Amino acid sequence: MVLLEGMALGWLLIVIGAILLLVEVHSPGFFATVPATVTDHPRYPAPCWELISSIPAGALLIGVVAALCAAGVTVWMYSRITPEGSPTTLSRDSLIGKEGQVIADVDATTIKGKVRIGTTDWSAHSNGALIPKGKTVRVVDSEGVHIVVEEV
């Protein structure tokens, strides 16, 4: 078995750190940056390893177990505070067929009209005639960043 010592081990840690940084760049959120930064310290690679290797095995084992327990508790806590079910999404296309209230006059020529569907306000225009504020409308289409409505 070949044991790496001194600067050879330091260079190995630098290479591993560079690989972890590339993984993080390729897949953000992989959380490889922290170990990459720790292993990629170019000025003190060998002394860092010497410090780590001087820790008694029992203390190192306790540290690893504590870190794994902390990670497990964190995941469990987040699962407890996360609401059940998938997050709801709302897009223009999912509005077709829904009804809402006109909150600013809607006409066929501009998108200055506003319609409130649920708790969200949307820019809108009508298929034809002017629809005054306060009327109930139904979404019939979506175009770009606004919806097309008709009076109910």
Image (tube, rainbow, N blue to C red):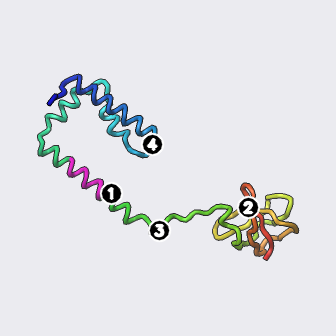
To which quarter of the image does residue 112 belong? bottom right
Answer whether residue 71 is magenta in the image. yes
Seen in the picture, residue 10 relative to 120 is either above or below; the reply is above
Q: Identify the secondary structure beneath mark 2.
A: strand
Label 4 or label 2, whichever comes before in sequence order:
4
Where is mark 2, residue-wise?
Answer: 142
Q: Amino acid at mark 2?
A: Ser
Q: Which residue in the structure is indicated by mark 1? A: 74
Q: Name which residue type carries label 3.
A: Gly
Position of 88 compared to 34: left or right?
right
Name the residue: 42% across, 64% down: 82
Residue at the far front in the pictured view: 1
Lower position in the chain sequence, tag 3 or tag 4: 4
The residue indicated by pointer 4 is 27
Q: Looking at the image, do the residues carrying marks 3 and 4 touch, with CB atoms under 8 Å apart?
A: no
The residue under label 3 is 85
Upstream in sequence: badge 4 or badge 1: 4
- Which residues are drawn in magenta? 64-72
Give the CA distance from mark 4 to mark 2. 34 Å
* Distance from the alpha carbon under mark 3 to that under mark 4: 26 Å
